[in-house]
């Protein structure tokens, strides 16, 4: 288990895939009023902005991706979607383009970060292996 985790941490594309899996929006429940979903969208967008301010780019990316996924893929399936109008909906729709652009920029930033961290982890693993080999030689 620990070995699998280390291999996953060292593979930038696997880390990005895992981050994308965390960003999947949940299915829409028709029993929940659609305005509640729009309020949630606006809150996700707001929290994502706070995450960026705190330099928590991974969490910000997840929030922006959930926002986009819910707005584009899931909400149109809701029975109240057609003909629904509200201030919350207008606000969410106005934020959609910006959320997409920010998610794309954060994805590139995270890819670069994951690649840099993979190099660091590989160097640490190499140094640990060399230290272990030296210790074995010393003991013998």
Image (spheres, rainbow, N blue to C red):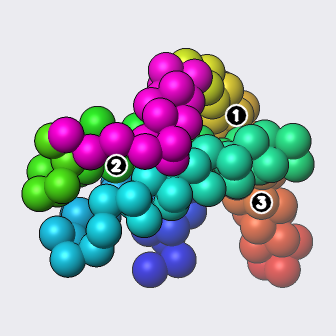
Question: How far across and how far down the image is residue 114, in percent?
Answer: 63, 38
Image coords of residue 135 (percent x, y): 83, 71
Between the residue at mark 2 and the residue at mark 1, the CA separation in whole angstroms equals 26 Å
Viewer-nearest residue: 108 or 81: 81
Q: Earlier in the sequence, mark 2 or mark 3?
A: 2
Q: Which residue is mark 1?
A: 113
Tag 3 residue:
128
Residue 99: numbered disc: none
Whether tag 2 and tag 3 are in contact, CB under 8 A, the answer is: no
Q: Residues within 10 Å of mark 3 (few under 14, many from 20)?
A: few
Q: Is residue 67 magenta?
A: no
**In front of the other: 33 or 127:** 33
User: Is residue 73 something that shows in the picture?
Assistant: no
For the record, the magenta segment spans 83-100
Is residue 139 or residue 10 the one in the foreground?
10
Q: Secondary structure at mark 2?
A: helix
Q: Main secondary structure of the magenta part?
A: helix
* Mark 3 / mark 1, whichever is N-terminal: 1
Q: Position of residue 104 (x, y in %)?
A: 53, 23
Q: CA distance from mark 2 to mark 3?
A: 44 Å
Give the SS element for disc 3: helix
Is residue 54 found left or right of 103 in the rendered image?
right
Distance (Cα) linking label 3 and label 1: 22 Å
10 Å neighbourhood of mark 2: few (<14), some, or many (≥20)? many
Identify the mark nearer the N-term, 2 or 1: 2
Residue 128 against residue 84 in the figure, above or below: below
In the rendered image, which quarter contains the C terminus?
Answer: bottom right
Q: Residue at x 43, y 45 (%)?
A: 86
Q: Residues within 10 Å of mark 1 (few under 14, many from 20)?
A: few
Element type where label 1 sits in the image: helix
| Left or right of residue 102: residue 119 | right
Give the labeled residue for mark 2.
Answer: 70
């Amino acid at each position: 288990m620990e070995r699998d985790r280390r291999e996953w941490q060292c593979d930038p594309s696997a880390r990005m895939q895992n981050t994308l899996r965390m960003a999947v929006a949940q299915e829409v429940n028709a029993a929940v009023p659609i305005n509640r979903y729009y309020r949630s969208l606006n809150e996700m967008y707001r929290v994502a902005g706070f995450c960026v301010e705190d330099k928590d780019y991974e969490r910000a990316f997840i929030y922006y991706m959930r926002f986009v996924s819910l707005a584009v893929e899931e909400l149109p399936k809701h029975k109240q979607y057609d003909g629904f109008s509200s201030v919350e909906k207008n606000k969410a729709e106005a934020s959609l383009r910006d959320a997409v652009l920010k998610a794309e920029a954060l994805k590139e930033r995270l890819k670069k970060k994951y690649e840099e961290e993979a190099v660091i982890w590989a160097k640490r693993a190499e140094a640990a292996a060399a230290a272990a080999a030296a210790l074995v030689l010393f003991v013998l």
